[in-house]
């Protein structure tokens, strides 16, 4: 049996997925604990990328498109932790386990991973992911207690977008859902102390337009 220190990111995630908590309302989502090796969490936090400024947040991530960070081919060459995480989510064992657990169809998809450092003032309006995203997973990185309620908010749909729950934010916690017409989610206008760090892992269709974002 592998020791904790010897487990790869793929092995760690597979164990986490097996232990995940499946919630079925208002849509199917899975809560994660221990999604990645602890050493990889440290290495991501230490990446030398400056967070975007807080000016002009309007409830959409594309507000700061010019300052967004992706685990693309260039960054895989620069940072070993980025390559390790990318290789884990390209591992056929991981892809097949995700499909078995969630019912997602990941045939002919591409991997896209974004590193987010959300500064005070950040928020996201309730939204559903665009149709070209076939899988969404967020892994939270910070252990700051003040961020505990700054995870992904789960909502019912229109017209009221009623708040239902929040995926707990904390180091190496996370949430998975399969984008659909009813997967309304966001981030409330909580007072952020420090940076709300996370990585967002998507499998997207092969016709994804912004290919520089792809792993």
Image (cartoon, rainbow, N blue to C red):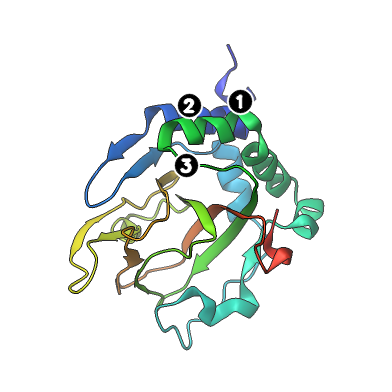
Q: Image quarter for residue 11?
A: top right
The residue that label 2 is drawn on is 15
Q: Quadrant of the N terminus?
A: top right
Residue placed at 82% from the left, 52% from the top? 77
Residue placed at 31% from the left, 45% from the top? 28
Q: Image quarter for residue 193?
A: bottom left
Q: Position of residue 122 (x, y in %)?
A: 41, 75
161 or 153: nearer the eye? 161
Q: Is residue 79 left or right of residue 35?
A: right
Q: Are the residues at dot 2 and dot 1 in contact (C-beta closer than 8 Å)?
A: yes
Q: Position of residue 129 (x, y in %)?
A: 44, 63
The residue that label 1 is drawn on is 7
Please report whichever mark, 2 or 1, sits nearer to the chain's N-terminal start: 1
Residue placed at 72% from the left, 64% from the top? 211
- Residue with the most extreme bottom position: 56
Residue placed at 46% from the left, 73% from the top? 119
Number of labels in the image equals 3
Q: Is residue 15 left or right of residue 29?
A: right
Q: Which is in the foreground here, disc 3 or disc 2? A: 3
Badge 3: residue crowd in 10 Å (few <14, some 14–19, many ≥20): some
The residue that label 3 is drawn on is 104
Q: CA distance from mark 2 to mark 1?
A: 10 Å
Q: Is residue 210 left or right of residue 184?
A: right
Q: Are the residues at dot 3 and dot 2 in contact (C-beta closer than 8 Å)?
A: no
Position above or below: 72 against 105: below
Q: Any mark on residue 192, and which?
A: none
Q: Label 3's element?
A: loop
Position above or below: 69 against 28: below
């Amino acid at each position: 049996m592998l020791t904790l220190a010897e487990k790869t990111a793929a092995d760690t995630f597979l164990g986490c997925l097996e232990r995940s908590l499946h919630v079925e309302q208002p849509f199917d989502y899975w809560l994660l604990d221990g999604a990645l090796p602890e050493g990889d969490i440290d290495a991501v936090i230490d990446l030398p990328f400056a967070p975007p400024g807080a000016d002009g947040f309007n409830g959409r991530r594309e507000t700061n498109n010019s300052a967004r960070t992706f685990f693309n081919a260039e960054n895989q060459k620069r940072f070993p932790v980025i390559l390790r995480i990318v290789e884990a989510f390209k591992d056929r064992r991981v892809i097949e386990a995700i499909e078995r657990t969630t019912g997602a169809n990941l045939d002919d998809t591409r991997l896209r991973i974004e590193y987010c450092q959300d500064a005070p003032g950040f928020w996201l309006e309730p939204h559903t992911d665009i149709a070209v995203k076939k899988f969404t997973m967020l892994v939270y990185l910070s252990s700051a207690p003040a961020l505990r309620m700054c995870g992904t908010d789960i909502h019912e749909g229109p017209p009221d977008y009623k708040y239902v729950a929040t995926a707990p934010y904390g180091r190496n916690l996370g949430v998975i859902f399969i984008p659909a017409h009813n997967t309304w989610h966001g981030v409330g206008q909580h007072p952020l102390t420090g940076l709300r760090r996370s990585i967002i892992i998507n499998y997207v269709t092969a016709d994804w337009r912004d290919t520089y974002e792809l792993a």
